[in-house]
Image (tube, rainbow, N blue to C red):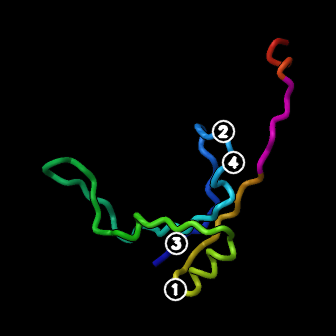
Amino acid sequence: MTARIFQQPKHAMQSGKAHTDDWVLEFAPSEARFADPLMGWTGSGDTQSQVKLTFPGKDEAKAYADKYGISARVHATPPKRLKLQAYADNFR
């Protein structure tokens, strides 16, 4: 079982900073998806790929992975860049 640990970024429709400090442990898929011939839906027998665990910090997520023998890779969080500009710049 392999997993990745990362800090979830805020998406484009989110203006606040809720849940951006949480760290997520997400399992990698262990088998390929397949198309259902009758309905055309994609499916898989892998239930671990549906599991996302959230932790308050990176150390807690790594400790959980070590405790249960999960080989996990930690992905670094990209630096946050602020674009500071005045409202008057829209009219120049």
Answer whether labels 3 and 2 touch (C-beta < 8 Å).
Answer: no
* Mark 2 residue crowding within 10 angstroms, few (<14) / some (14–19) / many (20+): few
Kindly report the secondary structure that dominates the magenta region of the rendered protein.
loop
Give the residue number, with chain letter if any, for mark 4. 17
- Residue located at (45% from left, 78% from top): 1
Q: Is residue 81 magenta?
A: yes
* Mark 4 residue crowding within 10 angstroms, few (<14) / some (14–19) / many (20+): few
Looking at the rendered structure, the kind of residue marked 3 is Ala
Give the residue number, with chain letter if any, for mark 1. 68
Q: Helix, strand or loop at disc 3?
A: strand
> Distance between the Cα atoms at labels 1 and 3?
12 Å
Instruction: From the viewer's side, name the closer residue of 4 and 32.
Output: 4
Q: Is residue 90 left or right of residue 46?
A: right
Disc number placed over residue 44 in the picture, else none = none
Magenta range is 80-86
Above or below 41: residue 75: below
Q: Residue 52: x and y, percent?
A: 49, 65
> Distance between the Cα atoms at labels 2 and 1?
36 Å
